[in-house]
């Protein structure tokens, strides 16, 4: 219970990795602010957190909208008395050859993955500073933030950008006692990968499930990653054992990309 009584805000918390992180942080003793676009699923995760004996509140917000992100943090302050841990997890993928990507598609994915992370860093840092809290900011990068993948080129560039924001924010906020780190999952069996696999099949002619199986086949530990695998590492980043770590974006991928 290393983070007992802390308040954590998780974006993209309605499903997949974000839900896994929220439930793990609740298990570690945190109260949760759950942010996503999907109200019904958010409500279900909030119910799970309450059943674990922790408090949860949820906010429907688009992380690409700066005002909505600041409003979500204000909600955390009003409902749960402040914020200690900000997990900028929400993200979207896109499968397309670079030659065919449109301006609208680039704007859409950058708005969520890059701007969404930036607004989250800004809103959390402002709250931590105003309340004198040595908070922790934790951002979702990816193996695709360490290596550019074919047909995932623009997505990869957004995840490289998350690492850049993580490093710069760590340097800017260190003097205030705020740490900023990222997590880089590999191949996690969430809806995002169902969609990636489907789109890969359309673009390459592979059978449904083939691309996913090929990627999983490259994992040294021999199985796909689960949201719990990611959440365990995020719990470390959220807790005191990572107090002397900032600006880092380690791979948590079962042995797929080696750096
Ligand atoms: P997912 O698609 O299963 O879930 C993403 C959640 O984010 C959804 O609930 C969705 O509603 C929400 N969301 C999307 N856009 C939003 C917005 N603008 N505002 C608020 N919420 C929004 O995805 P996931 O697999 O759980 O991925 C979570 C994060 O982890 C993403 O940043 C993703 O890029 C990253 N990641 C995933 C994998 C993987 O293999 N699944 C690997 C590496 C990194």
Image (spheres, helix red, strand yellow):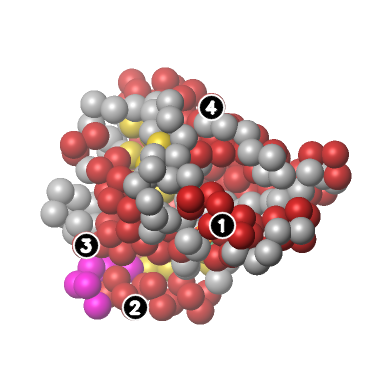
Q: Quadrant of the N terminus?
A: bottom left
Compare residues 59 and 20 and report the one nearer the observer. 20
Percent coordinates x, y for residue 246 in the rendering: 34, 27
Mark 3 or mark 2: whose residue is earlier in sequence: 3
**Rendered position, 14 above or below 176:** below
Please give the name of the residue rendered at 48% of the width and 61% of the height, measured from the top-left corner.
189
Magenta residues span 51-56
Mark 1 or mark 3: whose residue is earlier in sequence: 3
- To which residue does mark 1 refer? 212
Q: CA distance from mark 2 to mark 1?
A: 32 Å
Q: Which mark is residue 17?
A: none
- To which residue does mark 3 refer? 27
Q: Quadrant of the C terminus?
A: top left
Element class at badge 3: helix
Q: Is mark 2 within 8 Å of ligand 1?
A: no
Element class at badge 2: helix
Q: Answer whether labels 2 and 1 touch (C-beta < 8 Å).
A: no
Q: CA distance from mark 1 to mark 3?
A: 30 Å
Mark 4 or mark 3: whose residue is earlier in sequence: 3
- To which residue does mark 4 refer? 164
- To which residue does mark 2 refer? 47
Foreground label between 3 and 2: 3
Is residue 116 rendered to the left or right of residue 176? right
């Amino acid at each position: 219970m290393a983070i007992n009584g802390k308040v954590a805000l998780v974006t993209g918390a309605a499903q997949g990795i974000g839900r896994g992180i929220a439930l793990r942080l609740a298990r570690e003793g945190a109260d949760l602010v759950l942010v996503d676009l999907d109200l019904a699923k958010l409500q279900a995760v909030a119910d799970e957190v309450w059943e674990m004996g922790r408090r949860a509140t949820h906010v429907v917000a688009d992380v690409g909208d700066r005002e909505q992100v600041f409003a979500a943090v204000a909600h955390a302050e009003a409902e749960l008395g402040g914020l200690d841990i900000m997990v900028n997890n929400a993200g979207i993928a896109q499968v397309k050859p670079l030659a065919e990507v449109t301006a609208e598609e680039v704007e859409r994915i950058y708005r969520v993955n890059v701007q969404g992370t930036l607004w989250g860093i800004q809103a959390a840092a402002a709250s931590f500073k105003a309340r004198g809290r040595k908070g922790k900011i934790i951002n979702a990068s990816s193996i695709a933030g360490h290596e550019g993948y074919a047909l995932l080129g623009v997505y990869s560039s957004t995840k490289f950008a998350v690492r850049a924001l993580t490093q710069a924010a760590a340097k800017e906020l260190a003097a205030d006692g705020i740490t900023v780190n990222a997590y880089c999952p590999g191949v996690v069996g969430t809806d995002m990968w169902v969609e990636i696999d489907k789109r890969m099949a359309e673009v390459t002619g592979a059978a449904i499930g083939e691309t996913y199986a090929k990627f999983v086949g490259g994992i040294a530990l021999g199985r796909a990653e689960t949201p719990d695998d990611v959440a365990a590492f995020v719990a470390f980043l959220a807790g005191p054992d990572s107090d002397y770590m900032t600006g880092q974006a380690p791979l948590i991928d079962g042995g797929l990309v080696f750096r």
